[in-house]
Image (cartoon, rainbow, N blue to C red):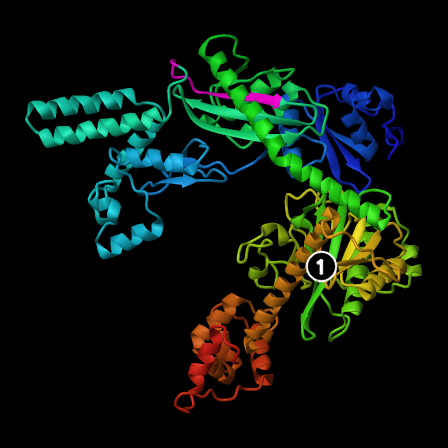
Amino acid sequence: MADPSSYRPKPGQIPDSPGVYKFRDEHGRVIYVGKAKSLRQRLSSYFQDLANLHPRTRTMVTTAAAVEWTVVSTEVEALQLEYSWIKEFDPRFNVKYRDDKSYPSLAVTLNEEFPRVQVMRGAKKKGVRYFGPYGHAWAIRETVDLMLRVFPVRTCSAGVFKRSAQIGRPCLLGYIGKCSAPCVGRVTAEEHRQLAEEFCDFMAGRTGTYLRRLEQRMHEAAEEMEYEKAARLRDDIGALKRAMEKNAVVLADATDADLIAVAEDELEAAVQIFHVRGGRVRGQRGWVTDKVEAVDTAGLVEHALQQLYGEESGDAVPKEVLVPAVPDPAEPVTEWLTGRRGSRVDLRIPQRGDKKDLMETVQRNAQQALALHKTKRASDLTTRSRALEEIAEALGLDSAPLRVECFDISHLQGDDVVASMVVFEDGLPRKSEYRRFQIKSFAGQDDVRSMHEVVSRRFRRYLHEKQKTGEWEEEATEAAGSTEPVGATEATQSAGATEAPGDTEPAGTPGATEPAEAAGATESAGVTGPTGVTAPAGQDADGPAPGSSGPLDEEGRPKRFAYPPQLVVVDGGKPQVAAAKRALDELGVDDVAVCGLAKRLEEVWLPDEDDPVVLPRSSEGLYLLQRVRDEAHRFAITYQRTKRAKSMKAGPLDTVPGLGDSRKQALLKHFGSVKRLRAATVEQICEVPGVGRKTAETVAAALAGAAPAAPAVNTATGEIIEDEAAGAASSNGGTRP
């Protein structure tokens, strides 16, 4: 625990002006971001007697090791910069609202020649008109199904649209009258866009005029005895009214507003938002967050406003925002919202009438959301806490291991030996900090030696990061017997590097992509790491995925291997544990506990102990260790399988340095087969677009040194297949050169 007086700025250093400040911990990570009208007054309040501080504030200032600030000219700029830094650094002591689900919206792609109506999630795109968000996708589809009868706008995908245009026949919706079939020319692009705009007008709340127009057309058709047309218009009116009934009128004056309510206790807070457009509730969403900083209701509202409108502009910001408490001062927030919208935005507390009644409804939803969240989460929190306590007690640790790292080795009969490192924090996987290694100091199968190498490399990088900050003397590493340059042997791989992307699926979800695990990079010269920094030759560029909350360097970029665990778990028994412990001892790391989990009897092995620790089968601690071990095994074996699959598909062109997929395809397309390419001269290879003379010479030399494959034989007939065909097959990913 740090003493705040050790990093307190000297008197007169802090300016008396608006600004934004950051607290950093001993590892350089930003742990709190705040803004102030007067930096001097606000920061001075943190450096008073600890007994007078709020418990959460006291925890923050004792965790921090440094404070820094940036001066701005206005409070609005401070609000904007605070939001940007919270998004960038993800500080652990800031309140951060996270959606408990992905909320769908009804989108009309007005940026396309033939606009399409669809359900859309995620970030908003330019030129697309959005309505919602809605609580459920099925609610959107029911509404769209009713409205397509009157507004037959295209809903098909680009592939279906293109296919129908090619065959000259519309899809089923075109036949049953729920699509105007622009794909086959039943309507022009202008007529279809007019339909899409009318659809948007109706969804935006301008319903009365359109319904009256339909009713007039129905009466005219009846007077002219066109009863079938009148009946069809009657059914259209009924469909639109049923769609309108799904969003009941809540504010009679056709108000456009967002209503925000907060339900909170000492530890958590739930926020509910109702989006009212044209007097009707068009969408609803909610968040739940831990109250990790000392914040009142007004502060929670301010954070919610930043989360809601930080990325929005124009009509996405309503004219009126109704809240349970107004931030103090309110003027900067109101000015910021006005700037986001481009016109005046009112921020106020409803006092009477329909708006107050609706706010009470939103408040009840927030209270219900908080109660439901506590019911669902209480069991998980209790179980994880008990598991960590049981592990600490069984292993004789001073405190619960909040960060656990597990290592596993994987290979196939001694080939393609790789290792994995998975990270669990607070009993949950931290996939942005997973790492993968290639074993390269020796060849063959030796799990004990592999474990020693991997643990050494991981903690050597940790000590290297500490050397940068002056926390560790460089001589300590040298005295430990390490003569290898730090970082020279790192080979952490990522899904975005030279390995195939298929091995980054989440646990238990084969084939899915897990972006957070694509955290590493290759050792090649000029490889760009996830932070945008080019790694020099011989060093890895691994690091947490962008946006992760791992340790950061002085520029705010993620560090690599800079945050130590409290417990290292290895997949194996006594030999693997001894190897891991020996690696730590050689590096002088004595504050990290080590244990191993053997698969046979699920025994927990400790260093220098002849007998294992046997946890009860019903122990939550054992279950957590098993989860950690199994996740490390999954991550390692998936990587190993990907490497093996890639090596099986390798051809002669794969060995040419500096030759990428595009130029390989261009060469094979130009010559037709590897055999013809091997027989070509350097001048002929230079004729291929994008291939220079130096590359051509490299290709010719590589193919000249590669032995031609044996002729392929058709096993059914015994016929020898022509070399040209075999060479062409190899260009499609076969194993033949």
- Residue 609's spot in the image, x, y percent? 89, 60
Magenta stretch, residue numbers: 252-263
Side of 603 where 353 appears, left or right = left
Q: x, y percentage for residue 735?
A: 53, 78
Q: Which residue is mark 1?
A: 540
Is 483 covered by the magenta stretch? Answer: no
Left or right? Give the position of 47 relative to 328: right
**Element class at badge 1:** loop
Q: Quadrant of residue 139?
A: top left
Using the image, determine if residue 531 lies above or below residue 320: below
**Is residue 116 positioned above or below 517 on the image?**
above
Q: Is residue 542 above or below residue 99?
A: below
Specify the quadrant of the image occupied by residue 173. Answer: top left
Q: Point out residue 36 in the picture as x, y percentages from the top left corner.
A: 71, 22
Residue 214 point in image, percent of width and height? 20, 25
Residue at 92%, 55% (x, y): give it: 476
Residue in view at x 78 percent, y 22 percent: 54
Q: Quadrant of the N terminus?
A: top right
At x 82%, y 66%, the residue is: 575
Report if residue 345 is visible in the image.
no
Task: Inspect the image, locate mark 1, and give the three-letter code of the amino acid beneath it.
Answer: Asp
Q: Nearer the viewer, residue 487 or 228?
A: 228
